Amino acid sequence: MPGPAPSRLRRLGRALLPGPAPGANGAALYRRWWLPWLWTAPAIGCAAVFGVFPFLNTVLLSFTDAKPLGGAAGFVGLSNYTRMLDDPDFWLATRNSVLYALIVVPLMVLLPLLLAVLVEKNLPGIGFFRSAFYTPVLASSVVVGLSWQWLLADDGLVNTWLEKAHLIRSAIPFLSDSWLILLSAMGLTLWKGLGWYMVFYLAALGNVPKELHEAAAMDGAGAARRFWHITVPGVRQAMMLVGTLTGIGSLRVFTEIYMLGGSTGGPGGADRTLPFYIKDVGLDPLTGNAGYGSAVSVALFALTLGLTLLAQRLTKEDES
């Protein structure tokens, strides 16, 4: 069966593809100006439905006294924000989130880099170690949280081993002391994220010229000096990216606190982070206030935005 004529194929291609064609004055014109918008319409629609609209709706709800299960919502102005500023539980949750970020971000920037440097070399069996370090990334956060519950319980593996080694006399309250719960959750976040950001650094290390290391080694520079003066400057952009992503993730942490501290967020809610606090005050079907929870959500967004802008400014200063 004969196919379409070449002239028909050319006309069809010119009609669909946004290639330039000479206009009346010889300038290059696009035949279909709407075609790029057609290709990007699904992504724009998803972003609008699942991103822009929920954000704007949250901002509007923050000025009301809406309930989690719906119903009439009255306009209350700035009372939710005034209540938030006078709420000690809000400031406790903010302290926990900021402290979480201040501890986790520097460690998550440095430890995966050291891990990537160790597994970068092509040694026999190194692929096994790369896979082993990446395995926690593939596990569900709930499964990992349950595993850490079993490890850190009073009769768990860690306390049992320490008691049998005669290093402690009584069980360490990893899951009942407020500070230890918070530190344990940070350890869980670090353990689960090391492999993920290790991959980031492995890609960045591939762009660092090997000649620089060879020349520095010939000049007598040791491994630590080469790491600080060659490796770190070579992956600085990746470090900024890891720091930004980790900072945003640390401010949004919820699962680790819920799995290790329980549904109350530690004893008396002492370990609740901002997402945890939003769940408690905004989504409880009986006592929740969706308007107040939305106001806290806006505060969390402002905190995250400030961290992102700070990271961008640091990146620009580093580039200059």
Image (cartoon, rainbow, N blue to C red):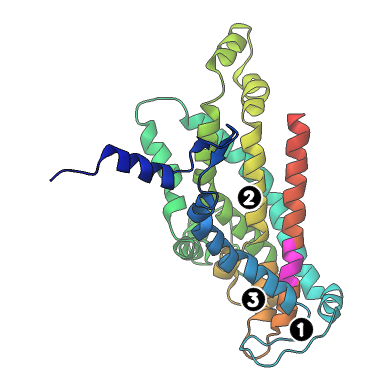
Mark toward the viewer: 1 or 2: 1
The x and y percentages for residue 265 are 64, 72
Total numbered badges shown on the rendered structure: 3
Q: Give the residue number, with chain letter if any, for mark 3.
A: 279
Which residue extends farthest top? 218
Relative vertical location of residue 255 with respect to residue 124 in this rendering, above or below: below
Which region shows up in magenta?
A: 296-301
Tag 1 residue: 64
Dividing the picture into quadrants, the one containing residue 69 is bottom right
**Which-is-in-front pick, marks 1 and 3?**
1
* Residue 31 vs residue 191, the one in the foreground: 31
Q: For mark 2, does the 10 Å Cα neighbourhood hold few (<14), some (14 to 19), or many (20 or more) residues?
A: many
The x, y position of residue 7, in whole percent, is 31, 39
Q: Earlier in the sequence, mark 2 or mark 3?
A: 2
Place of residue 184 in the rendered image (x, y in percent of width and height, measured from the top left)? 60, 58
**Which residue is identified by label 2?**
246
- Estimate the spatial distance between the alpha carbons at disc 2 and disc 3, rounded to whole Å: 22 Å
* Secondary structure character of the magenta stretch overall: helix
Task: Tell me where residue 130 appears, x and y as whole percent.
Answer: 42, 38
> Marks 1/2: CA distance?
32 Å
Name the residue located 85 percent from the left edge and 78 percent from the top edge. Answer: 78
**CA neighbours of label 1 inside 10 A, class few (<14), some (14 to 19), many (20+):** many
In the displayed structure, 81 sits above or below 167; it is below
- Quarter of the image where one finds residue 57: bottom right
